Image (cartoon, grey):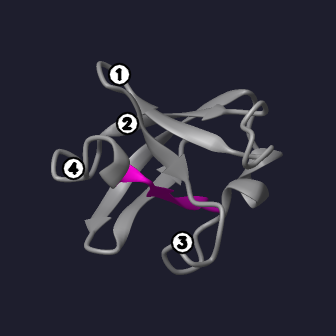
Amino acid sequence: METKYFTVTGLNHRYGSDFLEPGMKVKLVKEPDNEVDAEAIKVEMDGLGQIGYVSATYRTRIGESMSAGRLYDKIGDTATGTVRFVLEQGVLCTLDE
């Protein structure tokens, strides 16, 4: 099965990324009522709630990671992911399948 990577963005609007480490679990939650993007997927962590969003644009994606739009139809209303890399330009995760 092909590994699906995604980038978490918007972290600096909440908690930042200093607390994130490889192996941590995140929850992806579709946000169809989002006024800006009907394919928005928010990223949450237990105990914190929302920490960011799955990147929706090439400007904020790391490498060839999937945008929220490409990932949207591949998950149910929720899904889980795992933090793989915490980089200066963002946080790269894999979709748990």
Number of other residues with Cα within 10 Å of mark 1, as a class: few under 14, some 14 to 19, many 20 or more = few
Residue pointed to by mark 3: 61
Given contact means CB atoms under 8 Å apart, are the residues at marks 4 and 1 in contact?
no
Name which of mark 4 and mark 3 comes first in the sequence: 4
Residue pointed to by mark 2: 25
Q: Does the magenta stretch include residue 2?
A: yes
Q: Which mark is residue 46?
A: 1
Residue pointed to by mark 4: 21
Q: Residue 79 carries which label?
A: none
Inter-mark Cα distance, 2 to 4: 9 Å
Label 4 SS: loop
Identify which residue, 35 or 95, lies in the foreground: 35
Q: Which residues are drawn in magenta? A: 1-11
Give the amino acid at mark 2.
Lys
Name which of mark 4 and mark 1 comes first in the sequence: 4
Q: In this rendering, which labeled residue sits more in front, label 2 or label 1? A: 1
Give the amino acid at mark 3.
Arg
